[in-house]
Image (spheres, helix red, strand yellow):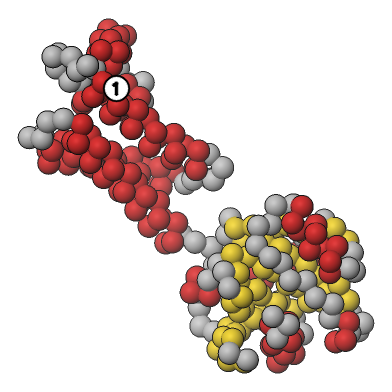
Amino acid sequence: MTSDARHPRDQLQDLLDDRLGPTERAEVRAHLEACDECRNAFRRIEWVKRQVTERLTTVDVPARLRADMAAALDREEASARSAFSWWRGGATWQLAAAATTIVLVAVVATWFYAGRTDLVAGVARDYRGYLDGSLTVERRTSSPAELEAFFRDRGIQFRTRVFDLGMMQYRLVGGRVHAIDGSPTALYGYRHDGGATLLCQMYEGRLEDLRGDAVVREHGGITFRMYQRDGVTLVFWQEGPVTCVLASDIASDEVLQLAFAKAEKL
């Protein structure tokens, strides 16, 4: 049933955020016990907050983002109250909660894409870290099948394609589960018989996420983007939902040809 008492809609968010005094909190709680409409509205707001909390607790969220989110929610709450003040009933708070959710997602998305890491520079740093030993392999093996099984066991959801490049004198060393811009990656390295190093990473992403000017090449119907960062050549290409990249400090044309060869094994 719905109580005839005043609906404390303006206080539901304050109750959830623990901003009410003891007396006011007790009154609102008592109203929720008797009013289905407000209780359902409170549950919707509570669900939105829980979803946001679960998704952001594992992310290092800058103070600026938190402030932007709070400001956006405050603006949306005021707008919703004004826009829907004439509309009585559950639909008012359904729309208000939906609008609040949309604004929150928009703020997070705007911050995320505006502040994304330079993926190309990140992969170049990974290559340097691999060379100096600060980025090590977790599973040392020369078996592509064993390394693919390792990636599956470690939670990589997409299909990894680890190949034996022995015909090109590159021997598989091993790999690890890494991350690029918060996305899990399958990272593995090769060692040339002459001492050169080749690093491969695979992650779910798009070529469109890459920044900076690239040398673009087409080969076998596949688009390759080649970048130079601090003496490291990086070649990216798409394999379905997965982006692949080869990185090395050997000659650029050689890295490109190795990328062609790996992609041709599709």
Image quarter where the N terminus lies is: top left
Judged left or right of residue 225, residue 156 is right
Residue 157 at x, y percent in the picture: 65, 57
Mark 1 belongs to which amino acid? Arg
Q: Nearer the viewer, residue 86 or 1?
A: 1
Q: Quadrant of the C terminus?
A: bottom right
Q: Residue at x 83, y 74 (%)?
A: 190
Q: Position of residue 80 (x, y in %)?
A: 18, 39
Q: Say if 230 sits above or below 86 in the image.
A: below
Residue lying at 17% horizontally and 20% vertically, measured from the top left: 7
Q: Is residue 261 above or below residue 182?
A: below
Looking at the rendering, which quadrant does residue 72 occupy? Answer: top left
Q: Nearer the viewer, residue 160 or 209?
A: 160
The answer to whether any part of residue 126 appears in the image is no
Identify the residue at image location x=84%, y=66%: 145
In front of the other: 248 or 206: 206
Residue 77 placement, left or right of 216? left
Left/right placement of residue 54 relative to residue 79 reads right
